[in-house]
Amino acid sequence: MRWGKFINLNTLSPNMTLLPILATIFGLGEGIFNLPQAIRIFKRKSARDLSIFTYGFQIISVIVWLFYGLEIKDFPIIISNSFAVITLGVVIFGWFLYGREKTKRKGVKRKT
């Protein structure tokens, strides 16, 4: 596979300006910031406090940015959003495993 079709290799040149470098670093930070939540979910085997709507909207937003980066062949956007999709995917996967647990209500009886 030739990456030149998908990535503007000019953004990888030694003459890269500070802005694309910072965009890549902070973009990767967006993905890294999801790791503590993912670790907590799998360590505790619980995701009941997690708002799936927040993470759902966030992953949709990141996927749109990833497609945009692929369309314009921009390396910093592609790398940072690819990493964010992976880490957000891990958090959402953890929610599917542990977040929808049934809670028993003590002292509350259902009417039948």
Image (cartoon, rainbow, N blue to C red):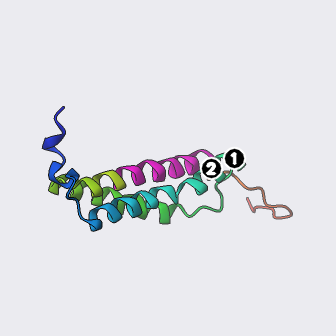
Task: Give the quarter of the image for residue 17.
Answer: bottom left
What's the magenta region?
A: 81-98
Depth check: give the residue in front, 107 or 45.
Answer: 45
Q: Residue furthest front?
A: 14
Q: Which residue is mark 2?
A: 39
Depth check: give the residue in front, 107 or 81.
Answer: 81
Q: Which residue is mark 1?
A: 43
**On-image quarter of the C terminus:** bottom right
Q: Amino acid at mark 1?
A: Lys
Check the image and report above or below for 68 versus 89: below
Disc 1 crowd rating (10 Å Cα; few below 14, some 14-19, many 20+) is few
Q: Amino acid at mark 2?
A: Ile
Most frequent secondary structure within the magenta stretch: helix
Check the image and report above or below for 42 versus 84: above
Position in image of residue 102 (x %, y %): 69, 52
Q: Residue furthest right?
A: 107
SS type, badge 2: helix
Badge number at residue 5: none
